Amino acid sequence: IRRHNHFKTPSDADELDDLDDDMVVGVIAEIEQEVLDESDSDNDEYDLVDMGAPQPEAGNDSDSSFDARNESISSDGSFDPNAEDSDSDDSMPEEEQAATSAKRRKDDDAPSGSGKESENTFDLDLDDETDETVRAIIAAIKKPRSAPPEIKLEDFITDICFHPDRDIIALATIIGDVHLYEYGNDGNKLLRTIEVHSKACRDVEFTQDGRYLITCSKDKCVMVTDMETEKLKKLYETAHDDAINTLHVLNENLFATGDDAGTVKLWDLRTKQSVFELKELEDQVTQLLTNDQNKLLLATSGDGYLTTFNIAARKMLVQSEPYEEELSCMGIYRGDSKLVVGTSKGRLYTYNWGYFGYHCDMYPGLKSPISLMVPITDRIACVAGEDGNIRACHITPYRNLGVVGQHNMPVEALDVNTSGELLASSSHNNDVRFWNVKYFEDLGDIKYNEKHNTYKEQRHNLPSSKCTNASDFFADLTKEDDDEGDTNDPDAGPSTSA
């Protein structure tokens, strides 16, 4: 190949005259130098002594001079592109190949250095280490989990719901399936996947006794699935004329649904038709809610209204003044005496129970839109929205308690288990994360005149957060310095206690 690149095929007699022996010898010398340079740079990859030189064809005048030069090169070794590689396994004897293969298998089976190092790292005893940084790392590794690990799905998660009695969480997806996971600090296990809807499943809820799973979808259907048999118990086909956006379970038999056009319906599992249907809103119903008495059904909507329905009378009771923002979520606090509504502008409106015409208090809340709200205790709410942060708020008086957890993308669903110790959230990243919020049980009541720093509260990270506060970095150091100062103060006089 190299000779063809350097030699030119003459096309006429004039060009043949230009090719003299000196030119041929010069080109051959360049080829030899290139071969020698390549052999030096390969670091013994090719053994020039063991390789044979190519045999020139007889009867070619130009190749005869090349043969003369090649004879002098062959004594030192020359490069043959057609020769077999002496370093390859094919050129080795069978005994050498077997020995080499056995050695490779032995090397592959042996533990790697990184594996040994990681093994030794985890075997280190905390008491044997004197370096504080190493001790902190070992303590963090050996620290038991306080919440289940993250659940990751391939499909977009539209809603989540905890089972009232068992350690099961239901995940609704945009393709219409519902995944049931058994969660625990040691790991999560997929129990089953139920294919319930042909389009996006927008809301999923368990009945209060946990026997049935109710789902609503963009396909305008409501499906009730038996948790024990995993079979469809009831199908409300074309339950609404428009896509259903939300549902709320009242008790073991009653549940309500709201669609994108503002229609609200009440259903009974013992009947095939809806109990009543009311159309008092012009935009989508964002959330439905009742208290323990189940006398009033409240609905927030995208057109800025809080609407209250009398369930027994089957009619609208009152509708609030219009707000210039979307009312997206709500929760009941303070012994069913306060209703708090979150908005798309980050505000929190408070209503006295039974007086839903206009709010009695307003808290600026967060600077980002609030789309989700979950009551953790009777006076603490967790809210989330587009910024991906889950924040805790104290209700009446309002205080930002700090950040409960974080997501990289907007939060889509939020729910708390029956005991109130575990909070779950899903984001646009198709993940479900768990947060242990048991520490809220020990939080004392906040007084109205208590001083606080609003700027610091918005950025404060609570124990469940994956981030730490900057002030916590020096907390232990300051404490150690104070202790040493108290015990080793040379200027301290003797005790004067009687």
Image (cartoon, rainbow, N blue to C red):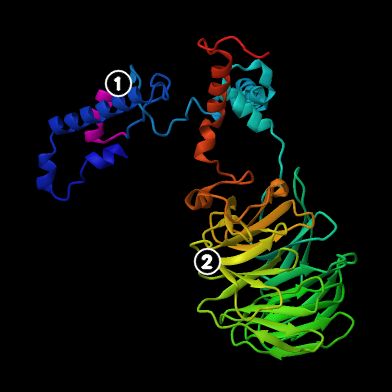
Residue 469 magenta-drawn? no
- Depth check, front residue: 392 or 164: 392
> x, y percentage for residue 345?
50, 69
Question: Which amino acid is tagged 2?
Answer: Gly
Q: Nearer the viewer, mark 2 or mark 1?
A: 2
Q: Nearer the viewer, residue 113 or 153?
A: 153
Residue 62 painted magenta:
yes
Q: Which residue is mark 2?
A: 346
Q: Which residue is mark 1?
A: 73
How far apart, in angstroms, are the residues tagged by discs 2 and 1? 85 Å
- The quarter holding residue 300 reads bottom right
Whether 388 is drawn above or below 128: the answer is below
Task: Name the element at disc 1.
Answer: helix
Quarter holding the C terminus? top right
Residue situated in front as seen by the camera: 270 or 302? 302
Q: Residue 174: tell me if it is visible.
A: no
Q: Residue extending furthest front?
A: 498
Is 473 left, or right, of 432 in this rendering? left
Question: Dot 1: few (<14), some (14–19), or many (≥20) neighbours within 10 Å?
Answer: some
User: Residue 159 bears which disc, if any?
Assistant: none
Where in the figure is residue 187, as x and y percent of width and height?
Answer: 75, 45
The residue under the point 54% across, 36% down is 472
Are the two marked residues, 2 and 1, in contact with CB atoms closer than 8 angstroms? no
- The secondary structure making up most of the magenta span is helix
Percent x, y for residue 200?
Answer: 66, 73
Horizontal side of 122 relative to 46 (left or right) equals right
* Residue that appears at 59% across and 9% down: 494
- Residue 268 lies in quadrant: bottom right
Magenta span = 58-73
Mark 2 crowd level (few <14, some 14–19, many ≥20, 10 Å Cα): many
Residue 339, relative to residue 19: is it above or below? Answer: below
Residue 215 position, x and y percent, is 75, 73
